[in-house]
Structures are given as structure tokens and as C-alpha cells.
Amino acid sequence: LNIAVLGSGKGSNFSAIASAIDRGEIPAKIAVVISDNPGAMILEKAKGLGIPTEVLPRGKYKTWLEPWIEEELVRILKKYHIELVVLAGFMRVLKETFLSCYEGKTINIHPSLLPAFKGKEAWKAALEASVKETGCTVHWVSKEVDGGQIIAQSKVPLLPGDTPEILHARIQQAEHELYPRVLKAICLDWLNQKGG
Ligand code: GRF
């Protein structure tokens, strides 16, 4: 299965997925890594592994992409024959132009037990709310931000002495286990349907 990974930042989830693929655990190939941030570490990591990279035009807005940029994104995804889009720390909300082509084919990981704590820095919100546990969620991407159908979740405890950084690191550890596991399940399912 040809996948694209989209990220804006350090790309630790990308690395976890790439390693799992490398170990032969996921029947997928990362055909391209795409970023909206030309300085993102995820691009360096991809290049280091010999994976093609593409950078989107920055555009006028920080949190979303104008339709012409989403068209460009769709063009790139088609060029690489992408069947599944994997968002891993991609900081732009994707809208109609993209979703009309890739809704049902795009997954995201979010650092909370959705529907709790949607939006940015969800680990901080969990800490401030003094909940007993938080975690991470893999979900299908839909037009409601962090609101698409939930695929799987992993729980993480809050512990005495937690700072936002410590808690975020604990959630990320859980992400690095959950995301490859979910991706594997989706790919196997997909291949079964194709084959049968
Ligand atoms: C993760 O915490 C993910 O939940 C959120 O963005 C972060 C990406 O981290 N959507 P990385 O770039 O994969 O290290």
C-alpha cells in the first residue's frame, strides 16, 4: 500500500512508522513525505532514509491551506499514487478541496483521548484539568477538526510531578506504539479487501 506521511515538525511518529515498515511489520511503502514547513525535521529524517520529500507553498494563513494549495497537495498525492494519507503532526486543518478526494483515506494521531481535549497542546489541557489519565487517539480525518471516527486509543496515566513536557513525552511513547499498530491493521484490512 502506497502511503504519504504529512508532518510539520520533528517527525517522531514518522520515524516509528518507517522503522516498523523497515522491520517488515506493515505491508506499506512510504512513497513521499510532505510538509508545509521547509525547516521541519521530518523532511531531514525522510531524506536520510532516501524517501522523496515535497514542500507545500506556505500561503497566507497559518492554520489552514488555501484551496489552490490543497489542489497542489492533491496533485502531489496523485503523482505518487497515494492510497492512504497519514497525518503525523501536520499543523494545518485540511478542508473541502482535499477532503473531497481523500476523506476516508486519511488518518491522524491526536495526543488525547478524544473527544476530550481537541485542538492544540492537548496534553497541557489534560494536565490543567487534573484528569487521572489521558492518552492518544488515531482517527479518520473529517471536516470536524479532531472529530472524525475514532479507530483506536491508548491510555497514559498522569503521574505526580508531571510537567507538560514529561507528560507529552509519555504520550508520544504511546503514540509510537499505537500508530504503527493501527496502520498495520488498516493495511492488512485493505489488502484483504483488494484480494478477496
Ligand atoms: C504528536 O504528539 C501528535 O499527536 C500531534 O503532533 C505531534 C507530532 O509529533 N498531532 P511528531 O512530529 O510525530 O514527533
Image (tube, rainbow, N blue to C red):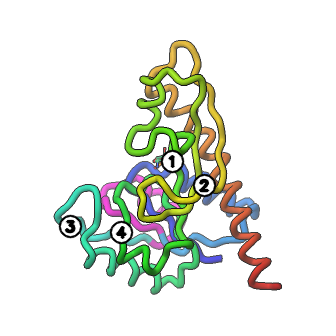
The amino acid marked with disc number 2 is: Ile
- Give the quarter of the figure containing the C terminus: bottom right
Q: Nearer the viewer, mark 1 or mark 3?
A: 1
Residue ID for mark 3: 59
Asked if marks 4 and 2 touch (Cβ < 8 Å), the reply is no
Give residue 138's position: percent from left, percent from top.
59, 53
- Give the quarter of the figure containing the N terminus: bottom right
Whether label 3 lies within 8 Å of ligand 1 gets the answer no
Which residue appears farthest toward the top when viewing the image?
160
Asked if marks 2 and 3 touch (Cβ < 8 Å), the reply is no
Magenta-colored stretch includes residue 87 = no
Quadrant in the picture for residue 67 = bottom left
The amino acid marked with disc number 3 is: Gly
With 122 as the anchor, is 3 left or right in this view? right
The amino acid marked with disc number 1 is: His
Q: Residue at x 71, y 54 (%)?
A: 181
Residue ID for mark 4: 95
Among the two numbered marks 4 and 3 on one chain, the one whose residue lies closer to the N terminus: 3
Residue 110's tag is 1
The one of 52 and 132 positioned closer to us in this rendering: 132
Gap between marks 1 and 4, in whole Å?
Answer: 18 Å
Among the two numbered marks 2 and 3 on one chain, the one whose residue lies closer to the N terminus: 3
Residue ID for mark 2: 150
Give residue 16's position: percent from left, percent from top.
61, 52
Part of the protein shown in magenta: 33-52
